[in-house]
Image (spheres, rainbow, N blue to C red):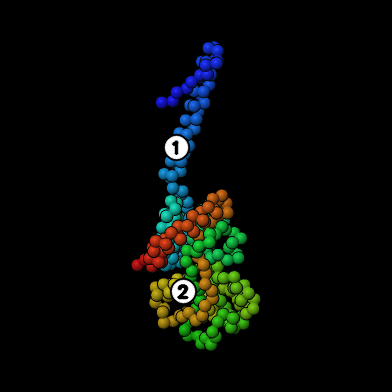
Amino acid sequence: MLLIGCPASLPCRFISRYCTRVLSQVVRYFLAIICLSMLSYSLTAAPLKITLAAEDGWPPFADEFGSGISHKLIQQAFKQVDVEVSTIVVPYTRALIMTERGTVDGAFNVTKEQSTVKRFVFGNVPLFTANASFFFANSKTVDINNKWQLPVGSLVGIIDGYEYGDELLQLIDKRQLKIVKVNSQRQLINLLLVDRIDTAIMFDLVADIYIEQMGVKQDISAKFNNHTSEIFVAFSKHNPQASQLSLLLDKGLLQLKQQGHYQQLLVPLD
């Protein structure tokens, strides 16, 4: 029980006023405590909610159905730190534009390199690494062992909007390469098959899936590496919580690794 005493030295006419003032201060104090408690409970009970753009054409990491390795990994990592993720499935280039404009909080499967760190906020722990190689039609004789030996003026197919490593511009300049940009992996493979390009850069696991689906395993092969990408979620610079989100994702990924769940999540879905 709270007892409020009035100083004996005060005249009687001041006692009532003094006690009223003290009581008012005590009431405000307890109201403040209640408000802070309610706010703390609200922040604890309600998870942070974010929306990410997921590309639609990069299996086994992210496909048109909103599934794949990246979806599993990101959902589980953010779950570790009480962040609720919803996704919008769009073409990769659109995902980057939406993130850059702040329409969404971030985008899946972005390579952290010089061209992207200027546009987005990244964490320090990659989702995973992905190898990309130069693929050739088996009907062509390839007598070279690395990208720096590509014949001068070669026609090289790539996906418009993808990142292919910081060395690509240097390679284009040194070997005077002619770049052919298309919108899908299937287009790249078809251009190789009909001899419209000399080679194509594709991410190995992604290319393997499309080559299998198209039934051309005997016709196209990877010959040598282009680069290895560290793949991240890129967060929008328009979001004031972008740095916090990147740190939370780092924390979630590290917790998954400590728990032994990370490697399990890298296994492609059937």
Q: Which type of secondary structure does the marked residue at label 1 adopt?
A: helix
* Numbered disc total: 2
Q: Secondary structure at mark 2?
A: helix
Above or below residue 82? Residue 6 is above
Q: Residue at x 56, y 49 (%)?
A: 240
Name the spot of residue 119 as percent of width and height, x first. Answer: 59, 59
On screen, 141 above or below 75?
A: below
Q: Nearer the viewer, mark 1 or mark 2?
A: 1
Residue that sits furthest to the front in the current view: 9
9 over 69 or under it: above or below: above
Q: Residues within 10 Å of mark 1 (few under 14, many from 20)?
A: few
Q: Which residue is mark 1?
A: 38
- Residue 227 is situated, as x and y percent measured from the top left of the image, at 54, 74
Q: Earlier in the sequence, mark 1 or mark 2?
A: 1
Alpha carbons under labels 1 and 2: distance apart: 51 Å
Q: Is residue 200 in sight in this rendering?
A: no
State the residue at coordinates (54%, 72%).
158
Determine which of the numbered discs, if any, sits on residue 145 in the image. none
State the residue in front, 143 or 138. 143
| 267 or 55: nearer the viewer | 267
Tell me where residue 256 appears, x and y as whole percent.
Answer: 42, 60
Q: Is residue 164 above or below residue 82?
A: below
The residue wearing badge 2 is 204
- Measured as percent of width and height from the top left, residue 131 is found at 49, 73
* Residue at image coords 52%, 86%: 142
